[in-house]
Amino acid sequence: MNTLHRLDGRLYLEGVALDTLAERFGTPLYIYSRQALEAAYRAYAEAFAATPHLICYAVKASSNLAILNLFARLGAGFDIVSGGELARVLAAGGDPGKVVFSGVGKTADEMRAALDAGILCFNVESASELHRLNRVAGEMGKIAPVSFRVNPDVDPKTHPYISTGLKENKFGVPIADAPALYRLAASLPNLRITGIDCHIGSQLIDLSPLADAADRVLALVDSLAAEGIALHHIDLGGGVGIRYRDETPPDLAAYGRALAARFAGRQERLLLEPGRSLVGNAGLLLTRIEYLKPGEDKHFAIVDAAMNDLMRPALYEAYHEIVAVNERSAQAKRYDIVGPICETGDFIGFARDLAIEEGDLLALLSAGAYGMSMASNYNSRPRAAEVLIDKNEIHLIRERETLGSMMAGERLVD
Ligand SMILES: *Cc1c(COP(=O)(O)O)cnc(C)c1O
């Protein structure tokens, strides 16, 4: 289904014209397509159907309760990185028994909340964390389910863009240290070994590093089994890329086949932690042009969305396609699209050819992942509203932040 399409010059998401949403809810406005969200999930479910698996949606990509609830209803588990994300999953009706808890800095409070909820496992990232988890579980009279996040150190020469799977970064434990850590975990009284985890990076557009990482993890699992440490699941993380511009992301069906071949005859269940690839292209950010500012060398379009709403361009120099919501017949000019924030880094996109006038609407595409979930109040800008489209139905899934709620919690001193 073509969820984003143009009809008589107007841009629609599913059955709803985007300009009507701007009138009703204001801008900047995040808008998601239910069909696109569900299609992305089903694509995973189908691609991995041959292998017993659990898809744990990485909540940090987009954490609105309505989106979590849609995935929960499709049977998804969740990959969380904080106690806040755990609370969201529970509030959205997610099954705690399908939650994996990642992250290098889990606090004792977060561990207690996750043990209380009864999560599937902790993806432990250091020996210190393991000892803390053993102590916290012991204090609660519980047994904590443990999986180590290993760092498979996928060859940087063949895959130079991988940012989290290399020896020198903060994530995971070196794969060479894993056997000793599993033995340590087996010796601690309040832990139960359940699995293994890796996550080598994000926006991967090539299958081979994912397959390389899988091979390294499977070899480790086999050597652990040989010494009597049996695992119940193998979590190969997220990281599958999406099309922002002209990328050709990995074919999920091919990834599914590659893993099916490797998992055939194995006992362990496959876990995956996709974030971006489930939501990225299901959402966009709608913004209105406040001013056009002609220049000698170039023109600026100053819009009402900024780096506090969509941080990816400023943070990663990420590219988002920008399209006019209502087509004009005029000649296109080249613009830098920038926000109103007092930072040179506050840009949305450079050198875009658009036929636009002040007051027009722009759609910033592929903004469903790491968009709203990274939004802040910088420059005291209330955070945007979020809307979910379901065919012709319009659901406000998050109200625009008010000035009052933005300042709530702050106090003057005597
Ligand atoms: C961010 C993250 C993911 C999701 O990554 P995507 O690139 O969005 O698929 C999965 N697992 C862990 C541990 C993460 O930190």
Image (tube, rainbow, N blue to C red):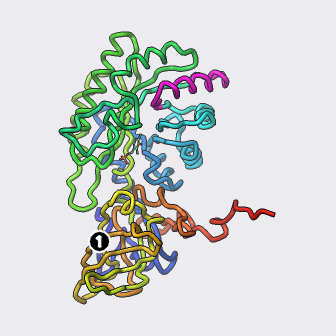
Residue drawn at the location 38% of the way across and 71% of the way down = 15
Q: Is residue 289 above or below residue 381?
A: below
State yes or no: residue 340 in magenta: no
Q: Main secondary structure of the magenta part?
A: helix
Q: Is the residue at mark 1 in contact range of ligand 1, meaning its CB lies under 8 Å from it?
A: no
How far across and down, in percent of the image, does residue 242 sit? 29, 54
Residue furthest left in the image: 158
How far across and down, in percent of the image, does residue 400 sit? 56, 69
Q: Is residue 321 above or below residue 49?
A: below
Residue 400 at least partly seen: no
Q: Which residues are magenta?
A: 123-143
Residue drawn at the location 36% of the way across and 24% of the way down = 268
Please state if 376 lies on the left or on the right of 240 as rendered: right
Tag 1's secondary structure? Answer: strand
- Point out the image quarter for the C terminus: bottom right
How far across and down, in percent of the image, does residue 369 sit? 40, 56
Please state if 355 lies on the left or on the right of 383 as rendered: left
Give whichever of 414, 348 is nearer the camera.
414
Please state if 219 lies on the left or on the right of 361 as rendered: left
How far across and down, in percent of the image, does residue 393 sit? 46, 68
Amino acid on which disc 1 is placed: Phe
Give whichever of 163, 50 is nearer the camera.
163
Residue 146 at least partly seen: yes
Query: Residue tagged by mark 1?
Result: 350
- Point out the image quarter for the N terminus: bottom left
